[in-house]
Image (cartoon, grey):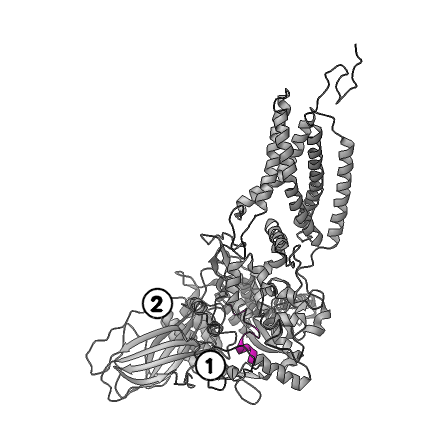
Amino acid sequence: MSAALPSEAGRPPNSARYVSVVGPRLKIVLWSVFAIVAMLGANSLYMASVTVLNWWTGRTYENWFSLWMALAHVALGLLLVVPFLTFGVAHLFTARKRKNKRAIRVGYGLFAFSLTVLISGFLLMRLDFGGSGAQSTALVINDPATRAAIYWAHVIAPLACLWLYWLHRLVGQRIRWRLGLGYLTAVVVFVGCMIVLHNQDPRKWNQVGSKDGDQYFFPSLSKTSDGKFIPAHVLDNDEYCLKCHHDAYEGWFHSAHHFSSFNNPAYLASVRETREVLLKADGNVKGARFCAGCHDPVPFFSGAFDDPKFDDVNHPTAQAGITCTTCHAITHVNSTRGNADFTIEEPQHYPFAASEHPALQWINNQLIKAKPAFHKQTFLKDFHKSAEFCSTCHKVHLPYELNKYKEFLRGQDHYNTYLLSGVSGHGARSFYYPEKAQQNCNGCHMPLKPSQDFGAKLFAQAKQPSIHNHLFPSANTAIAWLQNSPETIAAHQEFLKGVMRVDIFGLKEGGAVDGKLFAPLRPELPAVQPGATYLLETVIRTLKMGHPFTQGTADSNEVWLDVTVASGDRIIGRSGGIDENSEVDPWSHFVNLFVIDRHGNRIDRRNPQDIFVPLYNHQIPPGAGQTVHYELRIPADVSESISIEVKLQYRKFDKNYTDYFTSKAKPGDLPIRGHTPGEPYRNELPITTLATDRVVLPVAGNTTRVANAPVEIPTWQRWNDYGIGLLLKGQGRAEPRQAEEAFRHVEQLNRYDGPLNLARTYHAEGRLDDAVAALERAAAFTDPPAPSWTLAWLSGLVNREQGRLVDAERNFRSVLYDQTPERQARGFDFSQDYEVINLLGLTLFDRARQLRDPARRQEREALLREAVTKFHETLKIDSEDITAHYQ
């Protein structure tokens, strides 16, 4: 009898010898699987730890090393496929007839969960073999819910595999626990060390950049994260974005952002002059950095802009404009002062992003799609969705370094005007309010657009995957015309529909402000008398707009009223016509800003270095009106009915400016559409009719009936708009008395707007008792009720001026802090109305001044401290507010 065999796998000596189902060759494959899985396990534990650290702290700890680890994860996963399937299929084939059915069933489960890991990994990779934006939809899953389910399957399935493998091995050879524990210890130590290192160096987003860069960038307020220049190729990299964001790229390509710089001939002439003037005055062009921070970011942040001999046509950065990376590499909004007050950094890209090798580029693209979180965090911050982000370039003050006049001179300001409007839901003093507040600029200027871009998603208000439109539709039809892009012109004009309204409201006898008023015209119409003189009352009204009309470059925007009065085929009056040279009648009513230099000359060539003071400002606030009066003389021989047509016309630039920038073109410049060197330039920029109205009036003695289309504007609103226009136009003049009469009509038509706006009018005139009575009447309305916040604001104004400071304080606190169901439902938050915050601070200060008794010193100091707190609240919202600074 032979001796018993040694014990194996814990079996008694007399038991049958265990014969391994894994042969020598298959064992080599198995050990290769073990090796790859061991590396994947360490890699996965590291990646999971970084993910947990991000989630736990709310900060971003991914860096270059973690991106390489992500690439390694994908590579190891792909490397695992062949040996795993080879071993798995062979092992299942050889083991399927074993007697240990439990081990076989567990093995099947292990194989199934392992396949789940591999398949889910493939699906998460979003494999795409298309090119240049043309995506193959095979294996590309973007639906968030589906993708989340696949992700968690990929995370949980490996844990199930570990458990099933342990069960499977219990019936086989002894598990080498010491080897496994040693491996696990090494992995934990490595991952722990890496997490400690990560924890010391989170991504430094959302903080003000280094002041070291002031020497390179001031008087622009922009900063780079380290105070150094950013290489031009980093910012001018739009083709890289095109590969995944084709529709976003197409929108941007035709946008005013793209043509913000020297690639825009209208801007080119202006900035050339600014640079020349500053070079002559200062010996350098540093003052022009004020322009470059927003308009010319690529040459500016790369350092090329400061060169007085910078080739503004042929330099590699000259034609870049505001690139994709420029906006999306901004890491912090430093303040809402404007003048490019942001921090920008060189973004960290995935491996092989800069490679020119097609295969390596494909690997980079696939890695981004497989693990897009870091890419998204790098290029899309929460503040990109905010109005504060837009404020960095759409709010301007002119610094002393530019115009040698003042340390501060306000220029355009989209941000504050939006913030203090009713549209934003933050301004408590508006005449009208939308049903729901518009929370940011993007809601209007980046509407959703159906798209198949990689970044498209299904928004709640969209029926198909969409992106935000990067054309930024608004009003700059000049750039689109110069680029010969009729589709872009049409997109802007479509956006402008319904933004404005004009109303031929009434006629006043005698052509004087105190003449008898016939209004509103339609349905009732007066018969005009031949030979008589009238005052034609027209009203312009802003409708769908969250900032004043026109804002922006309001000094060069050409907006005017074109009024034509005819009798039959006979023109008997015209204002706002265009002559044969394409120049608008200079005596027209222009809805613009007329700015002059220190010598009284108009700023008519976008020359900011010469700006001194506005002569007049005809911009119209959001949700407000403007009245325009025309003297209308009816010829004595008129017998046919009188037709009056009023159009609100818009053209981006007037003839003065088109003559200027075309005359400044130099040899070698890019051609300008319609321009022939040496010949006069005809301004063919599109003229857009923003609004129109027409009325036909009968003539006394003519019994022919006249027909007019019905007016869809409610009668009370026509009176209200007329009154608002008079009130805003007439501070210190006769118009408030006319506004009072208009608002009385509104009250008679059973609208709270009548007495509420009467209170505004009386307060402006100092008639405080009348204002109190009007507010009491306004508060009595219930269908609909007057806005409680506007009532409280006006009540506070009146109480403050009447010396009832405690009541005024209560009123202002009500405006700022009451949280009513209506406010919440409509998205209104008036705690950011810093004009009211200032009023509260002033009221607290005045209350403190009344406390002269030494026994009340503590109460006085408490009021003063709270007043200071309120002014600081204002400065957090608007750091330039003069009232808060003074107080």
Quadrant placement of the C terminus:
bottom right
Task: Identify the disc placed on residue 714.
Answer: 2
Q: Secondary structure at mark 1?
A: loop
Q: Residue at x 32, y 80 (%)?
A: 507
Q: Residues within 10 Å of mark 1 (few under 14, many from 20)?
A: many
Q: Nearer the viewer, residue 671 or 291?
A: 671
Check disc 1 and give the amino acid type: Asp
Q: Position of residue 538 (x, y in %)?
A: 37, 77
Is residue 477 shown above or below 185?
A: below
Residue 782 lies in the magenta stretch: no
Residue 215: percent from the left, percent from the top? 72, 74
Give the left or right position of residue 331, taking residue 727 as reference.
right
- In magenta, the rendered stretch is 255-269
Is residue 261 shown in magenta?
yes
Q: What count of labels does the image hold?
A: 2
- Give the farthest residue toward the front: 25
State the quadrant of the N terminus.
top right
* Residue 671 in view, yes or no: yes
Q: Which residue is pictured at 69% across the width and 52% down the height?
A: 61
How busy is the neighbourhood of tag 2: few (under 14 within 10 Å), some, or many (20 plus)? few
Select label 2 or label 1 by which is in front. Answer: 1
